[in-house]
Image (spheres, grey):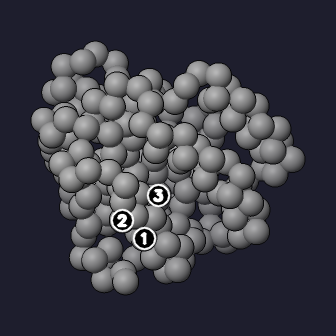
Amino acid sequence: MSYLDPSQEIRKHGQELPHWQQGAAMQFVTFRLADSLPTAKLRLWREQRDAWLKVHPKPWTPAEEREYQKRFIGHLEELLDQGAGSCLLKEPGNRTCLEEALMAQQGRKVEHHAWVIMPNHVHLIFTPLAPMEKLIQAWKGVSARKMGHGRIWQKNYRDTMIRDGEHFANAVRYVRRNPAKLRPGTFTLWEGERARAVK
């Protein structure tokens, strides 16, 4: 299993908020439906995050990573979990379209470890075997076409390279716990062998 190696080169891509990929280093990615966050709340969140990022550019120390997660990601996750927007992914047929898109390249261009499809967003832990932005573009594009609701996805996505085994285990537990308050049949949780071994 390949984790982030701070001594090795990291490829940056993306304009608004750069994404980071280091070969086949494992990633924890979240993407969401375009209507999943109230505009005013999202604007305020972005302003506060952008101000913090100017003072704390990547790559981050573990302490900076924890601060970012606590200040910004935790708050964003709370907003997402409030279930705003159309929540198209609550419908089993729509989730099936996304599941098929995610798993189409399993073992060839991606190695999935765990993912959860929530009503308005998705969390994934995977090892990219191709450029990450191309994988996510394909997952969003194929699933949107199959669902037939037009442009449903947020333009960007949030990514974090997995640092070590403890970080991986914590990410798996997070994915596992995310749908705890949802009714059965409104989400899909999938775990591979490595994730199932996490207690």
Relative to 54, is 60 above or below?
A: below
Counting residues from the N terminus, which is met first, the one under dot 1 or under dot 3?
Answer: 3
Q: Which mark is residue 150?
A: none
Q: Position of residue 39 (x, y in %)?
A: 59, 21
User: Mark 3 highlights which residue?
Assistant: 28
The quadrant holding residue 180 is bottom left
Q: What label does residue 176 carry, if any?
A: 2
Residue 142 appears left or right of 58: left
Q: Quadrant of the N terminus?
A: bottom left
Q: Which residue is mark 1?
A: 173
Cβ–Cβ under 8 Å for marks 2 and 1: yes
Q: Nearer the viewer, residue 174 or 167?
A: 174
Residue 105 visible, this orientation? no
- For label 3, the crowd category at 10 Å Cα-Cα, with few meaning under 14, some 14 to 19 and many 20 or more, is many
Query: Which amino acid type is marked by label 3?
Result: Phe
Is residue 47 left or right of 77 when viewed as pictured?
right
- 160 displayed left or right of 17: left
